[in-house]
Amino acid sequence: MISLEKLIRDVPNFPKPGIVFKDITPLLADPQGLALAVEMLANPFRGKGIERVVGAESRGFIFGIAVAQALSCGFVPVRKPGKLPAKKLSASYDLEYGKDTVEIHCDGIERGQRVLVVDDLLATGGTMGACCRLVEELGGDIRGIAVLIELAFLSGVKLLSRYEVHSVIRYD
């Protein structure tokens, strides 16, 4: 059996000193590893009637689209400001030093649609929390959150405690 953990490379001191970056590019380059990661993200949500997968820019697009295909549903991107051309909603969230904002098209999700939110990494929960607020503001019914990697020591899952959060790989 493939070990997904072995396909994730630690890059010390990136993007700044003291941070150990979890680089997923070796996993993405490995066909079996990529297929297994997608299946492990999608499988807990099979048969739950998911109608839309939402993924945050940019690595959430990679896994989100693949999970949407695996679940036979549509994909809705959440982007950085200025990237979406039609009417959109915005949500801001706190970073370690400052704020950031994400946006979603207003017509991406219909009221009552069952939604799975997907990303590559859950750290502090800021990005995922903003994505969930956008989905709910549009009337979406969040049925779960799926992430490839959870950095549990940063406690981001606490911000998302009202949702079912599925992590494929967890670093304590």
Image (cartoon, helix red, strand yellow):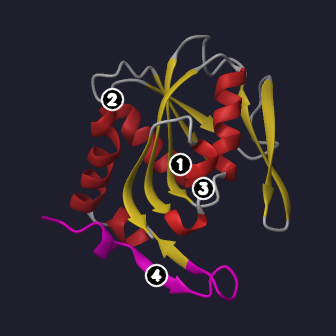
Give whichever of 2, 150 is nearer the camera.
150
CA gap, disc 1 to disc 2? 16 Å
What's the residue type where badge 2 is placed?
Answer: Leu
What's the residue type where badge 3 is placed?
Answer: Gly
Residue at 34 percent across and 25 percent down: it is 72
Instruction: Identify whether 137 is placed above or below 148.
Output: above
Say if mark 2 contacts mark 3, CB within 8 Å.
no
Q: Residues within 10 Å of mark 1 (few under 14, many from 20)?
A: many
Which label is found at residue 60? 1
User: Where's the N terminus, which quadrant?
Assistant: bottom left
The picture places residue 91, in percent across and down from the top left corner, at 79, 38
What's the residue type where badge 1 is placed?
Answer: Gly
Secondary structure beneath disc 3?
helix
Residue range in magenta is 1-20
Instruction: Identify whether 39 is placed above or below 122.
Output: above
Magenta portion: prevailing SS class: loop
CA gap, disc 4 to disc 1? 19 Å
CA gap, disc 3 to disc 1? 16 Å
Q: Residues within 10 Å of mark 4 (few under 14, many from 20)?
A: some
What's the residue type where badge 4 is placed?
Answer: Asp
Which label is found at residue 10? 4
Q: Earlier in the sequence, mark 2 or mark 3?
A: 2
Q: Is residue 154 magenta?
A: no
Residue tagged 2: 71
Q: Earlier in the sequence, mark 4 or mark 1?
A: 4
Q: Nearer the viewer, mark 2 or mark 3?
A: 3
Say if mark 3 contacts mark 1, CB within 8 Å.
no
Secondary structure beneath disc 4?
strand
